[in-house]
């Protein structure tokens, strides 16, 4: 159970949400690409939409994470901070790449 009065626990939970939602978005985008390869563009668009929703949730969690970090809930960078940022940034890149690839498949 989460203790909302414990800033370190709240920071950890925000970091874990960044990782989880980014991972979900990544899976959605990769599924969209597979569907586009099979010329199932309407289904691919639905997975892109789900990926964007998960990416939005990851972005919100990242904001919570960064706000908590800035408020001094934890000193210095740690593995979770690096891991969360890595997941988020690589998923942003993947989103752009897959959207471009789907556009190519549509042609």
Image: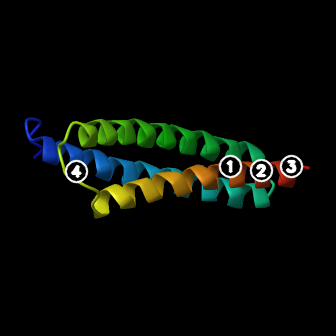
Alpha-carbon span between mark 4 and mark 3: 41 Å
Snapshot colouring = rainbow
Other residues around mark 1 within 10 Å, as few (<14) / some (14–19) / many (≥20)? few
Does 4 appear above or below 19? above
Question: Circles 1 and 4: CB distance less than 8 Å?
Answer: no
- State which mark lies toward you, 3 or 1: 1
Does 63 appear above or below 79? above
Based on the displayed image, in which of its 4 quarters is residue 69 positioned? top left
Picture residue at 10% right of the left edge, 46% below the top: 1
Q: Name the residue under label 3.
A: 106
Q: Of helix, strand and loop, which one carries label 4?
A: helix
Based on the displayed image, in which of its 4 quarters is residue 35 positioned? bottom right
Q: Mark 4 points at which residue?
A: 12
Q: Earlier in the sequence, mark 4 or mark 2?
A: 4
Q: Residue 14 carries which label?
A: none
Q: Which mark is residue 96?
A: 1
- State which mark lies toward you, 4 or 2: 4
Q: Name the residue under label 2.
A: 100
């Amino acid at each position: 159970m989460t203790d909302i009065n414990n800033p370190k626990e709240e920071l950890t939970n925000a970091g874990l949400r960044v990782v989880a939602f980014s991972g979900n978005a990544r899976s959605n985008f990769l599924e969209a690409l597979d569907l586009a390869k099979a010329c199932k563009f309407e289904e691919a668009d639905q997975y892109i939409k789900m990926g964007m929703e998960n990416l939005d949730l990851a972005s919100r969690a990242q904001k919570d994470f960064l706000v908590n970090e800035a408020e001094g809930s934890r000193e210095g960078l740690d593995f979770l901070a690096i891991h969360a940022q890595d997941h988020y940034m690589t998923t942003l890149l993947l989103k752009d790449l897959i959207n471009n690839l789907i556009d190519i498949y549509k042609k």
